[in-house]
Every structure is written in structure tokens, then in C-alpha cells.
Amino acid sequence: MRPSGIAVRALYAGVTLLTIASIAGCAHNQTAATRDGLPLAAAPTQAVPQLKSVMAAHFKVGAAIEPDSIDSPADAALLAVQFSSLTAENKMKPGTIGVAAGEYNFAPADQIVAFAQAHGLAVRGHTLVWHYRSGEWTEAPDWFFAGDAKDPHYHDIVAARLQRYVTDVVTHFRGKVYAWDVVNEVISDDPHQVYREDSPWYRALGKDYIAIAFRAARAADPDVKLYINEYSTDDAAKRAKLLSVIRDLRAQGVPIDGVGHQMHISINWPPLQNMKQAFDDVAALGLENQVTELDVSLYSDPGACWSHPPACLPDLGQPVPNDVMRAQAQRYRAVFDLFEHEPSIKAVTFWGYSDKHTWLTSIPVPRTNLPLLFDANLKPKAAFWAIADSSWQP
Ligand code: XIL
């Protein structure tokens, strides 16, 4: 998910608001051409390149999918041709897999893994531990935490449930999943906290749950890469906490291989330099980097939008102005140029593949959003060509 308000972010977003408003707004007294900007350039006439081949010298290229993504032959073909790795958008999370103590629902994830194996694609696992709750749905099911918190054995009981869950899930996918997000979003956005203290895991076990999960994952699969996954790693204060947590884990001898940077970014936030610093700081610790959930939103919302929907920018509507789509293509080109110059980046995974399905049309607020590389008809967008063909101009 995303951070709460940060002064500089809000300031920047204010500027963005004006920019977007001047691009998108006041349609009634402007012609469509003025409002939209010049049409995008025609796509190159060459055959559509395979992104995984274009990037092969640098990193794996992944997409997050749901099992029904591969029901349609056209989608399945696109995934098999364009990507070298898949991630389950939701179906490897504890809310799906962890039905009860010792009872698992692996079937939806197994469908994705079978497809990946049939097409020679890698699978990155996401995620063994997450605090997320939305209404009735939770990725930290209550059975993990059942019991009396005042019982002197409570800590050990919950720790044993976590250890068993991680062991069984990693064992189930051993040899099929090459990297796991062991924990997701464990760092707090609150300036007074390092760890996310509003997580049921933290409430039950304090910070110990992180070490328990990593150790259990390593014991279950000595070869799988173990990642800590986080958002807003570009933010210096957040990153300082993340790095301190990693140092603390390593001081205890906890196995950890890399940092996953979610990178739910927008067409003009955050600055490239901040992202570069995040990769470089992790590499300086001798760890790997992966971009794990890349999408480029059309909206540079103030941070407050994520906890206070009225703060989110208004719906751009359809069709989205050409200038916004052009800015997105240029943004994709710029971030891939950065990624390609960072040898510590081992994989870049998009949080989806086609604009027909993206979490950003419902979260943080329902509105038009087109954050991915292929349009709703699976046609490569300007954003695709901007990264697949460096000579093309949008
Ligand atoms: C999101 C999914 O895309 C949604 O379908 C679901 O409702 C909520 O989770 N950070 C993460 C991902 O680590 O697991 C989230 O995925 C997006 C934010």
C-alpha cells in the first residue's frame, strides 16, 4: 500500500494537481486538441519485441496475475511471450492459502505455477506474512492469533503456528518458486515507530515474527531467495528504518537475500534520484534488489489520499488526455533506464500486465487508471514501446 502524508510529497502533489488540472480540466472552454495535447506517435511498424528478451541481459521481467488471467488464450499467449516470471497477485497470500492451522488452499496458486512451468517461466512468491485487512477480508487470518494473550505460552503458541505455516507453504512450492517475499510492509510510516505496530503479528510477537518467518523459510528451502518487501523505499526516513531492521536481522544471523521495492509510482513521483538511492543503499549492504510491484499511476496523489479518499485527485475520465499517456511513456522509459544501470536489480515485476485489470481502478479510490504496458485489448501502449525500443519517441 502507500504512505500517509509526507510534507514534501504533498507539496509536490500540489504542483502536480495544478499540472493535471491544466492538462485535463476546464474542457468546456477548450477544444479537445488543446485539452489532450498532440496525438501520440504511431507505434513502430516492426514486430512486437519480447520484453523479456529485450531485458534479458539485465533482469527477469515479471507480471502479477490471477488464475483467471490465463483462462483466455490471448492473455495466456501474451504472458508466455512477454514475461519471464509470474507472481500471484493474491492467491499465494495467507488469506487464501491459510484456511486453518494445518489446512491449506493451494489450488489457485498451483494453477499459476503449473502454467509457469509449462511455459518455462519463473515464479516469485508473494507473500508469506502480511498484516493487511480490508473489511471482512484479512491476509492475517484470526486463527493464527487465537488464544489468551495473557497466557505465558501465548507467544510460543502463535510463533509455532507461524513457523508451521511458513514451513508448509515454502515446502509446498520448493523447487517451483525461486524467491519469496517473506514479510510484506513491516516498516511503519509513523515517525515515532520503526516497526508497523498496528499489525496483528507485531501485537502478538513483537518484532520476533520477522526473524521467525525468515528462519523457517530458509529451513524449508535452502535455495530460495528470501526478500523483505516494502513500499516507499525511495523515502529517506522510511528507508533508514528498513535498513536498520535488516541490520538487526543480520546481527541475529537471520538469513535474508534481498529487498523488494514495490514501486507503485506515478508519472511524476517519486524523483528518480530517490529510487536510485534506495537501490544503491541496499546494494551497499551486499543484498539483491527486485522491483516487485511496478505500476505507473496517472495520478500523483498527495500521501493523505491513501487514508483519506477525498484528498485523492479527481477522475481523469476517458479518454485520458494524450499528454498524460505521453508522460507515462516517458516515465516508464526513465525508470527502465535507471533499472538497467543498477546491476543489483535481479527482477522487475509489474503489478499486472493489461489495463483491463489493475488494483488502481479501485484502490485508493474508484477511478480511471491505466498504469500498465498493454491496453485493455492487449495492444502494446506507448509505455511499452518507450521501454522496448529506445529509438521510438511517443
Ligand atoms: C493488492 C491486490 O492487487 C488487490 O487485488 C488486493 O485487493 C489487495 O492487494 N502491495 C502489495 C500487494 O504488496 O500485495 C497489493 O496487492 C498491492 C499493494
Image (cartoon, helix red, strand yellow):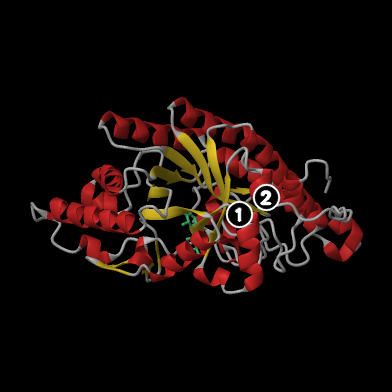
Q: Which of the labelled discs sits on residue 51, or is there none? A: 2
> Is 71 left, or right, of 150 in this rendering?
right
Q: Does residue 209 sit above or below 117 in this rendering? A: above
Q: Residues within 10 Å of mark 2 (few under 14, many from 20)?
A: many
Q: Position of residue 371 (x, y in %)?
A: 65, 56
Query: Mark 2: which amino acid?
Result: Leu
Q: Is residue 289 left or right of residue 35?
A: left
Is residue 367 visible to the viewer in this orientation of the structure?
A: no
Say if 315 sits above or below 388 in the image.
below
Give the amino acid at mark 1.
Phe
Residue at the disc numbered 1:
83
Residue 274 falls in image quadrant:
top right
- Who is closer to the viewer here, 176 or 373? 176
Query: 225 or 353, which is in the foreground?
Result: 225
- Residue 231 placed where, x, y %? 49, 46
Q: Identify the secondary structure beneath mark 1.
A: loop
Tell me whether the residue at label 1 lies in contact with that at label 2, contact meaning CB atoms closer than 8 angstroms: yes
Most extreme residue toward the top, as rendered?
284
Observer-nearest of 31 and 118: 118
Secondary structure at badge 2 equals helix
